[in-house]
């Protein structure tokens, strides 16, 4: 598949590049966190990252003063596996170039999305991007296996924490796997084996191929 840049016009339906943010302190703090030996890791909020001056900038400018969390997704990954969405935008910035595999919420038909609709976008190191609430996304993919990826994840406070306890009243309710997180899994993904809604059909995309 073609890998676009977030500076290409093709990215406009999915998100935008943010301007006026100094990410150096945050990137230095992210680099102090060791990569997992294999696979990926995620923490919704990390104290050392939230201590960076940019945290207030993301809160005030990025989210209009709403409470936020600044966490990290990091490791090694080349597969799509799943797509998720939130009711809010997400801000990402990486220590190294990384790739986002994206689709749009309105492309879901009867609880399923064809992975042929997924597009790949390369995000340069240190460039913050907003991923819109209507954009389906999941764990970033690394560009260089030697570097892996460290991608800051900025979201409204509480996102991706414990799932609320309620009785599903519609089909979409069944896709929720955590607070403010709706997930579509590929049949080959570990998440599908853990009971997540199987909502992706087609090839489980690998950027390595």
Image (cartoon, helix red, strand yellow):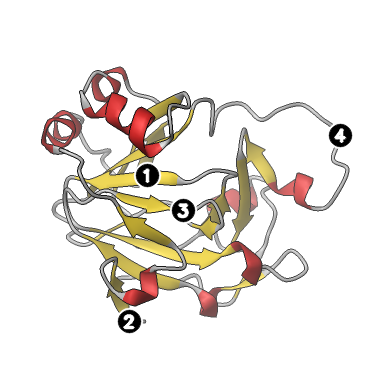
Q: Name which quarter of the figure residue 33 lies in.
A: top left
Rendered location of residue 187, percent (x, y): 62, 63
Of callouts 1 and 2, which one flags the residue occurring earlier in the amino acid sequence? 2
Residue identifier under label 1: 91
Marks 1 and 2, Cα distance to the nearest angstrom?
23 Å
Q: Looking at the rendering, in which quadrant would you find the C terminus?
A: bottom left
Mark linked to residue 78: none
Marks 3 and 1, Cα distance to the nearest angstrom?
13 Å
Instruction: Assess disc 1: are there few (<14), some (14-19) or many (≥20) residues with their C-alpha within 10 Å of its C-alpha.
Output: many
Residue identifier under label 4: 167
Q: Looking at the rendering, in which quadrant would you find the N terminus?
A: bottom left
Q: Nearer the viewer, residue 95 or 126?
A: 126
Task: Name which residue lies at 46% across and 68% down.
Answer: 13
What element does badge 2 sit on?
Answer: loop
Residue 22 vertical position relative to residue 126 in the rendered view, above or below: above
Rendered location of residue 53, percent (x, y): 20, 23
Of callouts 3 and 1, which one flags the residue occurring earlier in the amino acid sequence? 1
What element does badge 3 sit on?
Answer: loop
Residue 119 vertical position relative to residue 146 in the rendered view, above or below: below
Mark linked to residue 2: 2
Rendered location of residue 169, percent (x, y): 88, 43
């Amino acid at each position: 598949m073609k890998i676009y840049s977030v500076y290409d016009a093709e990215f406009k339906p999915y998100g935008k590049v943010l301007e006026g943010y100094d990410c150096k302190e945050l990137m230095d703090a992210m680099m102090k966190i060791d990569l997992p030996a294999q696979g990926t890791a995620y923490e919704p909020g990390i104290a050392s990252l939230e201590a960076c001056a940019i945290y207030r900038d993301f809160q005030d400018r990025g989210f209009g003063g709403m409470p936020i969390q600044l966490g990290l997704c990091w490791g090694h990954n080349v597969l799509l596996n799943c797509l998720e969405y939130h009711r809010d935008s997400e801000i990402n910035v990486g220590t190294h170039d990384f790739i986002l595999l994206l689709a749009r919420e309105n492309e879901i038909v009867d609880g399923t999305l064809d992975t042929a609709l997924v597009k790949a976008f390369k995000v340069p190191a240190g460039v913050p991007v907003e991923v819109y609430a209507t954009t389906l996304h999941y764990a970033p993919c690394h560009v260089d296996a030697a570097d892996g990826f460290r991608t800051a994840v900025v979201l409204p406070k509480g996102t991706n924490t414990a799932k609320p306890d309620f009785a599903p009243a519609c089909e979409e309710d069944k896709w929720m796997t955590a607070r403010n997180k709706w997930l579509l899994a590929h049949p080959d993904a570990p998440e599908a084996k853990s009971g997540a809604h199987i909502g992706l059909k087609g090839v489980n995309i690998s950027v390595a191929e």
